[in-house]
Amino acid sequence: MDSRSQTSFIPIRYFQEGFIYIISILKGMKRYMHIQIFNRRQFLTLSGIAGITVLAGSPKISLSQTGKEEKMAYTTKDYSKLIGMAGFSETLLKNHFTLYQGYVTNTNKLVDILGQMLKESKTGTPEYAELKRRFGWEFNGMRLHEYYFENLGGKAGLDKGSALAKKMTEDFGGYDTWEKDFKATGSMRGIGWTVLYQDSVAGKLYNFWINEHDVSHPAGCNPILILDVFEHAFMIDYGLKRADYIEAFFKSIDWKAASARMK
Ligand SMILES: [Fe+2]
């Protein structure tokens, strides 16, 4: 079964996920009464394409309400230089940038909220636990997109004399075999990320499938090359033809950026 048949089940999957609203329930914590935890699709929609930041809609959980100026831990990076890149339309890229900006915004909000809850000793609460779990999703959603955009925009192939190319030969038998495995991983049923990781302990390279931003990342490994295979990364331009998107991705890899991540 190819990716086209897989994609047809996506609406069913999200229907099954249903609406997960976890609203603050402790009566003594009215300041957190409007915190809402959404499922993945809701967050993508609300915090990304629609340009709405869910957490920003809760002024009661902003540090600014405490009289202190809110400090943003992270700032959105500008990847507009990628516009015009072969194989990626401006519409697709701008939508993707907007989605990424939502992750940055929500990561900052969670940093603020969790910090404030810690300061107020509100850590033994369901709200703290759920937001803590959410933090991995938002943070990795931010960071993985940064890696992804930063390993795009290249025009030259991988330098066969580079340390990365030599390591691919050592661990996979050659570049072509590595590429075959990476593309096969990116073409798997489902949505997520494909990441070329380097084990920082053993030094070995592995192509990993990451199902969700916040799970399945190998501990202590260094991300070398990131491929986004969520639908938003390709469907505007390629519809269900994920393989064509992956080919376009490979034509625009910034191999210098990827190689520079080697340790
Ligand atoms: Fe993405």
Image (cartoon, rainbow, N blue to C red):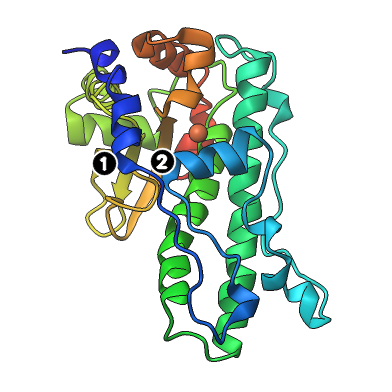
User: Vertically, is 142 above or below 122?
Assistant: above
- Ligand 1 near label 1 (Cβ, under 8 Å)? no
Is 177 displayed left or right of 44 in the figure? left
Against 6, residue 78 (above or below) is below
Q: Give whichever of 13, 78 is nearer the camera.
A: 13
- The answer to whether the residue labelled 2 contacts the one labelled 1, judged by CB atoms less than 8 Å apart, is yes
| Res. 211 in view | no
Q: Distance between the residues labelled 2 and 1?
A: 9 Å
Give the residue type that dot 2 points to. Answer: Ile
- Above or below: residue 70 compared with residue 48: below
Residue drawn where x is 24% and y is 40% of the image: 206
Q: Can residue 149 be seen in this view?
A: yes
Q: In this view, does 94 lie to the left or right of 197?
A: right
Q: Where is residue 64 in the image (x, y as percent from the top left)?
A: 79, 73
Picture layout, residue 237 above or below residue 121:
above
Relative image position of residue 188 (x, y in whole percent): 23, 24
Which of these two is toward me, 194 or 129? Answer: 129
Which of the 4 quarters of the picture holds residue 90? top right
Residue 215 badge:
none
Tag 1 secondary structure: strand
The image shows a total of numbered marks equal to 2
How many C-alpha atoms fall within 10 Å of the one at disc 1: few (<14), some, or many (≥20)? many
Q: Earlier in the sequence, mark 2 or mark 1?
A: 1
**Displayed quadrant of residue 177:** top left
Question: Which residue corresponds to mark 2?
Answer: 224
Residue 242 image position (x, y, % from top left): 37, 14
